[in-house]
Image: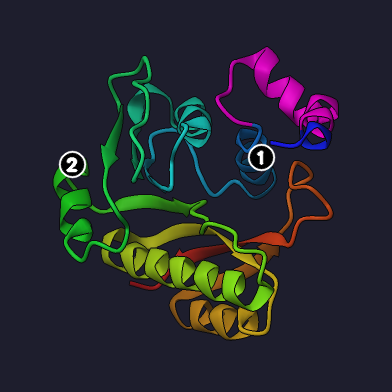
Amino acid sequence: MSERWKQERRKDQFYRLAKERGYRSRSAFKLLQAVRRYRFMKRGDKVVDLGAAPGGWLQVSRQVVGKEGFVLGIDMEPISELPWANVKALVADIADESLDSVIIKHVGSKVDVVMSDVSPKISGAWDVDHARQLYLAERSLEIAQAVLRREGSFFVKVFHGSDLKAYRDRLVEHFEEVRFVKPPASKQRSSEIYVLATGYRG
């Protein structure tokens, strides 16, 4: 890590807020801001979080769904246990074709919300990184289609690029409403953006 990167992080208001409020990552605020504005997650919901490490989105999701809901986090890296009985984490790869059935088994039913903050290892070659991110977004959509209940919601990270419109058009085929979301906590110079798709047609 460069000294410049460390200095920028120390100046980052959301990094500081995350430390103050006990969130495991600054990205927790991205989800919190999106949920507050668009209300696609509510108390009692069953939620799946793809790419959940280190657990910031799991913390926010539990805050929203309360003790009545259920949150399942999935990541290739182990996630330190959280202090709620209705928040679970699995070590798994979203490329695993059996993951759909594993999710249903652990949750016990179809779910209300699928979220994906999965990112590729950044190579620095823009076309390569965009393609890798789009593959992860496509795979996340496949999982969402398998585990979402009718009228459920899907929230996924993507990168700006030439294939983004085609991905959005695919979402439009399966959801009632699709919009691009750039939470204030997402760095303005970052190419990341989120797509929120609501009203899954099943």
Q: Where does the magenta region start and end?
A: 6-25
Looking at the image, residue 156 lies above or below residue 201: above
Looking at the image, residue 16 lies above or below residue 45: above
Residue placed under numbered mark 1 in the picture: 36
Q: Quadrant of the N terminus?
A: top right
Separation of marks 2 and 1 at Cα, in angstroms = 27 Å
Looking at the image, residue 90 lies above or below residue 66: below
- Quadrant of res 91: top left
* Residue 27 located left or right of residue 53: right
Residue placed under numbered mark 2 in the picture: 106
Residue 158 is covered by the magenta coloring: no
User: What is the three-letter code of the residue carrying label 2?
Assistant: His
Q: Position of residue 3 (x, y in %)?
A: 80, 31
Residue at image position (83%, 28%) is: 7
- Quadrant of res 14: top right
Q: Mark 1: which secondary structure? A: helix
